[in-house]
Amino acid sequence: MPDIKIVTEVAGRVCAIPIATGSNVGDGDEVAFVEAMKMEIPVTSTAAGKIKAILVELDDVIAEGQVVAIIEA
């Protein structure tokens, strides 16, 4: 299966990354949190698998639709 990209639906500042590269995640698990309009909005996995790469760091300012992580399915 091809790698799956996890993208954010909102622009903002990355305020938390509760997972690490190599971690296993399930469909719907929280991969990162983005602070936007004084709210913390979760970025969730769209499939189960192993985190291959995390492409953002804490305090990064990211755009809507930006890839946050890649999962090996």
Image (spheres, helix red, strand yellow):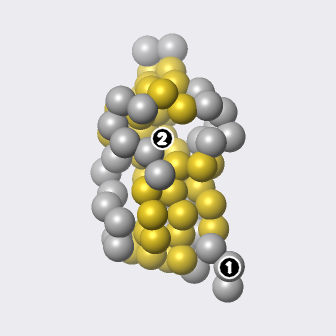
Relative to 9, residue 4 above or below: below
Figure quadrant of the N terminus? bottom right
**Chain-order first, disc 1 or disc 2:** 1
Task: Tell me the residue that label 1 is attached to.
Answer: 2
Rendered image: mark on residue 54 = none
Please determine whether, in this image, residue 39 is positioned above or below residue 8.
Answer: above
Figure check: 26 above or below 64: below
Q: Around disc 1, counting alpha carbons within 10 Å, would you say few (fewer than 14), some (14 to 19), or many (20 or more)?
A: few
Q: Nearer the viewer, residue 66 or 47?
A: 66
Side (left or right) of 46 relative to 68? right
Q: Are marks 1 and 2 in contact (CB under 8 Å)?
A: no
Tell me the residue that label 2 is attached to. 42
- In the displayed structure, would residue 55 be above or below residue 41? below
Task: Assess disc 2: are there few (<14), some (14-19) or many (≥20) residues with their C-alpha within 10 Å of its C-alpha.
Answer: many
**Residue 27 visible in this rendered orientation of the protein:** no
- Amino acid type, residue under disc 1 in the picture: Pro
The residue located at (62%, 42%) in the rendering is 66
